[in-house]
Amino acid sequence: MGEKDITIPASGARTAPPRGAESKAFQKTGVDLLIRFHIVDKIAKIYDTKNDAFQEQGKLLFESLTAKLKEKDEASFRVRHGALLLNGVRLKFSVGTYGIFKSVLEELRTRDVEALTFLPGLGLDELCRFMSLFAKRDKKDEAVYAQLVADLDAAGVEHVELEKISAEEIAQGLHKNTARMFFLSIVHLKESFARDQRKEPIKINTTRRLMQSIYNHIVEDEGFVHGLTNIKNHDEYTLNHSVNVCLLATSLGRRLGLSRSEIVDLGMAAFFHDLGKTDTPLNILNKPGRLTDAERVVMEQHPFHGAEKLVLLKEFRHLPLRAIHVALEHHIKEDLSGYPRYYKKDDINLFSKIVKVVDVFDAITTKRVYRTTDFTRAEAMSLMLEQSGTEFNPVILKAFVNMMGVFPIGSLVALTSGEVGIVHDINPDPKLLLRPSVKLITDAEGNKVDGEVVDLAERVPETGRFRRTIAAPLDPAKYGVEVADYFLAQAL
Ligand SMILES: [Fe+2]
Ligand SMILES: [Fe+2]
């Protein structure tokens, strides 16, 4: 059994997709083949190859494969961007076959298999041996793929080839789920705000489950979560802003060493920190230009309204008490200035201090009708550092800077090489905060490119010097770059 080591074009298509009637026939025989594969896979989990049902269904699968191998010199299933391809053509599922598609995709993924190729010369016995070994190896561990390949070799399976799942495919699957979580959060918050307006109960248990899911995504896919916080929605500012604040607060809570349950509580508190804004009139919330003193008084009531709404919730007992602190205190500064002004206390809650940092960061990096300038992510970091100790708690701010890097994920940067790129991930070494990895979007001549992701910590071997260095942060709006699109594209 030989392992293929070939490069497939990005589309995964080796041949032009068939059209018209040919396409219909291709889909039908392709899906039939998939169903037969699925049936044998299920049987092979329970019975050995000598079992009658195994033999009978194995024969049917063999016939389908033989027919496919007559059309082309291989029958190859491939997982690509969460879809299933047969010989480079995407198989289409229907309501009736969706479960089978899902099951086969899962079977391949569990074994770290990206492609499974049957070759001419395959015999019925060999196919049954393969199916038996494939079906029974369902325990997910690091070496699952290598063990499967070794077992197939030992069993003399020579006409079935496997390809290991690529890092890109793994990341894409992960990002897809993370993006889904992001949009689910927006939908849930929107529904919560609407329920609050209608005086209906908010589904706090759903919020808690969502926060647990957010925590898991941050553990597995933190850089991408930070990338998604570049998504801003100017029409529904409070929704996107609240979700961004929730994601960044959860991430920061983890950096600060809070326990999982504390982080879930922090996430809930951050999620609802601006709930009081649902009572702020839209003409004040979205007013272009400066607020009058009277309008400012109304605006500055949102912490009270938020805290009051949370206290009055029927589901209050399911809510962390600290959510109320956060709603009330998130505009109070480290030196206890800010608002509410007549809220007298010696100190404010730790959660409020965490939310304060991420709240300001998200707010000042979002273009708003009433602000003539917004800041790039890099400018926001240096601006906030100037307020360390007065507006922000210095320890929390430092942890935030270490988490985000000097050039946070999503920053547009000009490089000394003349190229321009988007910060893709920060360098995990705190000494190399100025050297993130960057996705190149223009070449040195300024031509738009779909470039690679380069590591700015990479040195030129001959000179020992860094190959590329950030020359300056750029304003994406001025360059017409929609940074959020880049992150979303990774999840498609
Ligand atoms: Fe607020
Ligand atoms: Fe806010």
Image: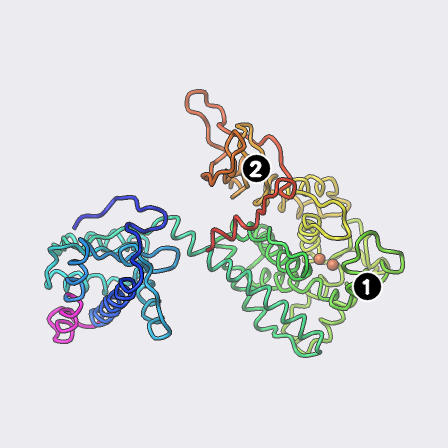
Farthest-out residue, top:
463
Residue under the point 81% across and 53% down:
338
Estimate the x, y position of residue 85 in percent, counting from the top left: 31, 58
State the mark number for residue 433: 2
Specify the quarter for ligand 1: bottom right
Q: Is residue 137 left or right of residue 53?
A: right
Q: What stretch is highlighted in magenta?
A: 46-62
- The colouring scheme, among rainbow, by chain, secondary structure or one colour, is rainbow
Q: Nearer the viewer, residue 446 or 259?
A: 446
Magenta stretch: helix, strand or loop mostly: helix
The front one of 324 and 452 is 452
Q: Spatial distance from mark 2 to mark 1, Cα to Cα?
A: 39 Å
Q: Where is mark 1, residue-wise?
A: 301
State whether residue 75 is above or below residue 462: below
Question: Where is 331 relative to 464, above or below?
Answer: below
Q: Which of 467 and 256 is in front in this view?
A: 467
